[in-house]
Structure formats: structure tokens, C-alpha cells
Image: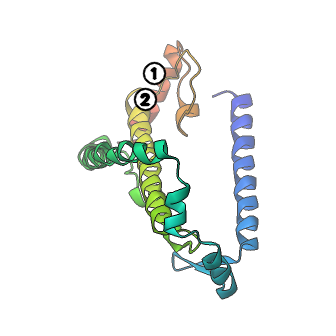
């Protein structure tokens, strides 16, 4: 990796840290805190949230008919999600110890904390649980795939692609055979 690339990556990480600090300040303004991993709102905030909850009947009455008709299609995705979850977890349980790759912690990617939001009705909470699972699962699967790719084929693509994972910047440039051999050897040395 060139010095210029390393400097840009360091700046990106610093900006990500600054963004997270900004999010932390905004969270503080919303009067909640985490106590032993549990979200706790001040009583007055909980009461205000409860008053803002839309009743399920008015929520459903306001839904467009086509939105209601597509709900089974959306929820049918739970089947491939659960299958992906099972297979990707089994994959890393079996293969990562052999590759000497650090396992991905599922709980770092899949979290269900929106249930603590009293301004959501039951259906909104169910939808939030579903989205938290689906998006968290996909992020978990991407990280498992990224660590696998880093181990077996750490080469950047010739074509620019969206959604690159966090390990991608460590990969050898496309067409740089010497860098690939160095990267491959460094990975072997690190996993002996």
C-alpha cells in the first residue's frame, strides 16, 4: 500500500470516528442511555413517546392497498435469510479454525434494540425486528465473506465496485503479481 493510500485511509477512519462522536452527542440529546446493554429512556421521554404512538388500526387504515399486498413478498424473504444465517454460520464454524481466521461475532451485526421504542406500535416493532435481522444478517455475511476473500484471494478488482468491505483496501492491486505474492505470504506468516 502506498503512503498516499495509507494517509487517505487514516483520514477516512478519523472521519468515521468523528461521525460516531457526533452520533454519540446526538444520542445524548435524546435522553437515553445504555445500562448493561439495555436502552433506558428518562420517564418523561417514555411518556412523550407513548403519546406519539400511532394506533395499529389507524396505521393499517392509512396503508396503501398495494403496500399491504406486497407484505407477504417481503416477509417471505425470512426463509432465505434464515437459511443464509444457518449456512454462513456453519461455514465459519467449520472453515475459519482451519484457515486460522478470526470468527465473526454475530451479535456485533445483528441487534434488536428498537423494541425499546415506545412510540412504535406492535406492527412497526415487528417490521423493525425484521429489518434489523435482515440488514444485520447481510452485514454479518459480508464480513464472513470478506474475511474469506482476504484469506484466499486478496486482489482488488479492475472495475470499481460499490459496497466494498472494510478489508478491501489491504488487497493487492489488480495486475500486481508481486504485491499479490507478498500479501499471500504475509497472510500465511500471520496464520502459522
* Residue at the spot 31% in from the left edge and 40% down from the top edge: 99
Q: Nearer the viewer, residue 23 or 156?
A: 23
Report the disc number at residue 121: none
Q: Is residue 84 above or below residue 19?
A: above
Calculate the distance from the C-alpha at mark 2 to the C-alpha at mark 1. 6 Å
Quick check: can you spot residue 154? yes
Report crowding for label 2: few under 14, some 14 to 19, many 20 or more residues within 10 A (C-alpha): few
Report crowding for label 1: few under 14, some 14 to 19, many 20 or more residues within 10 A (C-alpha): few
* Residue at the spot 41% in from the left edge and 26% down from the top edge: 153
Find disc 1 in the rendering and name its residue: 181
* Residue at the spot 41% in from the left edge and 44% down from the top edge: 69
Report the disc number at residue 185: 2
Q: Position of residue 18 (x, y in %)?
A: 75, 54
**In this image, 86 relative to 34: left or right?**
left
Q: Is residue 4 above or below residue 191?
A: above
Q: Position of residue 128 (x, y in %)?
A: 49, 59
Amino acid at each position: 500500500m502506498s503512503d498516499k493510500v495509507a494517509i487517505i485511509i487514516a483520514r477516512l477512519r478519523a472521519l468515521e470516528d468523528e461521525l460516531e462522536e457526533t452520533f454519540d452527542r446526538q444520542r445524548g440529546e435524546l435522553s437515553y442511555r445504555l445500562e448493561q446493554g439495555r436502552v433506558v429512556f428518562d420517564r418523561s421521554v417514555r411518556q412523550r413517546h407513548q403519546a406519539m404512538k400511532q394506533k395499529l388500526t389507524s396505521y393499517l387504515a392509512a396503508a396503501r392497498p398495494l403496500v399491504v399486498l406486497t407484505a407477504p413478498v417481503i416477509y417471505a424473504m425470512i426463509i432465505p435469510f434464515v437459511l443464509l444465517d444457518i449456512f454462513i454460520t456453519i461455514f465459519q464454524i467449520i472453515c475459519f479454525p482451519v484457515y486460522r481466521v478470526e470468527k465473526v461475532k454475530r451479535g456485533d451485526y445483528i441487534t434488536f434494540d428498537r423494541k425499546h421504542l415506545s412510540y412504535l406500535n406492535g406492527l412497526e416493532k415487528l417490521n423493525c425486528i425484521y429489518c434489523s435481522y435482515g440488514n444485520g444478517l447481510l452485514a454479518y455475511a459480508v464480513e464472513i465473506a470478506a474475511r474469506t476473500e482476504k484469506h484466499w484471494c486478496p486482489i482488488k478488482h479492475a472495475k470499481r465496485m460499490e459496497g466494498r468491505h472494510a478489508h478491501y483496501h489491504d488487497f493487492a492491486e489488480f495486475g500486481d503479481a508481486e504485491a499479490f505474492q507478498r500479501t499471500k505470504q504475509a497472510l500465511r506468516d500471520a496464520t502459522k
